[in-house]
Image: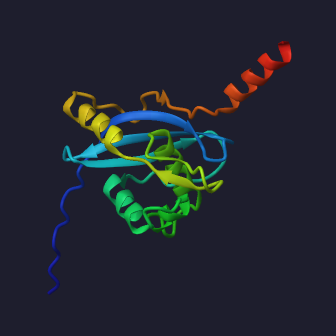
Amino acid sequence: MKTVTPKAPEVAVRILKIASCLSLSGKSTLVYQIGVKDKTDIQLRIVSNSSTGFFSHEWISFNAIQQLFSKAPANKPITSFLLHKIYEGQSVNTPAFLFAALKAEGLVEPSKESPRCYDRSDPKRFLAEVKTLVASSVDLKATDKPQKTVSKTTPEKTASKSSKKKKT
């Protein structure tokens, strides 16, 4: 007779932050969530895309992302391709979408050396923000509206700068 070991119940993710950002291409707006399991396991996921690109809604551990980052040479720029291992067999858009969220959170920044590549940033500010949210009573619902966390070089800002230049 075969013995079945019962699965441990899935631990719910407490949503700490819902935000939006531009995709890396700047062609769509993404909504992402930051959450926590067991008060220490930081999780991220993409929840919507204003364009047609498919993606996975799966929660991804921040530790898993950091482990992949640590496998890349420390002094070399990285790309979203590094995250493909997390999403094997799933939509190819998701790694780049998650990378856009990491950029919006200040965890990566455009490389000064290589176009279309990124340098890792110190996660201390991000971790401090999450720690503050964990200590608070924040527990958002998946349907709550996102904060806007769009990068400094949004098409809207670029357009408004160029329209100001034309007026002078």
93 relative position to 68: left or right: right
**Left or right of 66 on screen, residue 136:** left
User: Is 157 placed above or below 117 here?
Assistant: above
Residue at the spot x=73%, y=22% of the render? 161
Instruction: Please name the colour scheme applied to the rendered image.
Output: rainbow
Tally of numbered tags: 0
30 on left or right of 166: left
Name the residue rendered at 84%, 12% in the picture.
168
Residue lying furthest bottom in this view?
1
Q: Residue furthest top?
A: 168
Q: Position of residue 16 (x, y in %)?
A: 32, 35
Residue 29 image position (x, y, % from top left): 60, 38
x 34%, y 38%: residue: 125
Residue for point 29% across, 37% down: 130
Of residues 166 and 149, the one drawn nearer to the viewer in this rendering: 166
* Quadrant, the N terminus: bottom left
Residue 117 image position (x, y, % from top left): 59, 56
Q: Position of residue 14 (x, y in %)?
A: 28, 40
